Amino acid sequence: MSKPESRPYTRVAIADVGDPLVPLPDDLVRITPHPYQALGAPYGDRDPFWLRQGVVSRLRLAQAWLQAHTGYSLLIVDAYRPLEVQEFMVHHALRSLVEWEGKSLTSLSAPELCQYQWRVSQFWASPSPDLATPPPHSTGAAVDLTLHDPSGITLDMGSPIDELSDRSFPDYFASDARPFHQRRQWLCQAMESAGFRQHPHEWWHFSYGDQLWAWRSGVATAFYGRVD
């Protein structure tokens, strides 16, 4: 798997302000069942729909902007992800990619395995135990989300969340006549209006206060680190 230092945002300093993890309020709709819990990811007594209190407040601002400008609403797919869950999901993504291409992990040569690990690392952060390089979701400051309409129907955004392909890049459909790019733009505009920043490879991933947010914002220090 790619080393944490290969991601430039992991060089950002962290000075955690101690903002608590809180449950998502009922007015922010979340997907059920939670997709990683359904796979058996080891959450224990922790909840994937926890976020830092300040992040929840900003999600409500993004929701208000989105509803006022489009009539759509946010649909939360994933939020807090403990380190053990990150490790579980990285392995799951690796195994799924290998099997989707008709191979098995045990049949790969060392160079083949490294290539697959690199492909997964373009989307999945390393489950680094180093407090200086936490995976974004382990901070309670990152959220994966999409859009749904007033009748509760989830909008087609052009590719599913967690797809390991170029279609996941936010601007992939910029020259496509279908509505996917416009929908991604609405999501991004809503989130950025509330202070979030988008992952450069993932249309669905936004954060506020973590290292990725600081790096994309040009801020010297992140104020949310890993939460155990």
Image: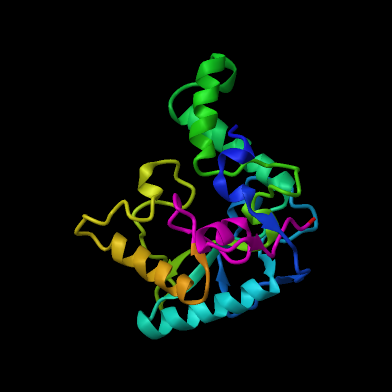
Task: Answer yes or no: is residue 114 visible.
Answer: yes
Q: Is residue 2 above or below residue 104?
A: below
Height in image: 122 above or below 46?
A: above
Residue depicted at 73% across the width and 72% down the height: 22
> Which percent across, then down, holds residue 182?
30, 66
Q: Tell me which corner region of the image, top left, top right, bottom left or bottom right, holds residue 152.
A: bottom left
Indicate the quadrant containing the N terminus: top left, top right, bottom left or bottom right: top right
Q: Is residue 214 magenta?
A: yes
- Which image quarter holds the C terminus? bottom right
Please say if 167 is above or below 182: above
Q: How is the image coloured?
A: rainbow
The spot of residue 33 in percent (x, y) is 60, 59
- Decide which of 213, 135 is in the foreground and name it: 213
* Coordinates of residue 15 in the picture (x, y in percent): 74, 62
Q: Is residue 141 on the magenta stretch? A: no
Q: In this image, 198 relative to 17: left or right? A: left
Vertical comparison of 103 with 118: above or below:
above
Taking the spot 52% from the left edge, 17% from the top edge, the residue there is 111
Magenta part of the chain: 198-227
In this view of the protein, can residue 41 be seen by the observer?
Answer: no
- Residue most extreme to the left: 177
Question: Residue at (41%, 79%) from the top-left corner?
Answer: 150
How many marks the image carries: the answer is 0
Residue extending farthest to the front is 220
> Residue 136: horizontal and vertical position, in percent?
63, 54
Q: Could you say which quadrant of the image residue 19 lies in?
A: bottom right
Residue at the location (43% across, 27% down)?
Answer: 101
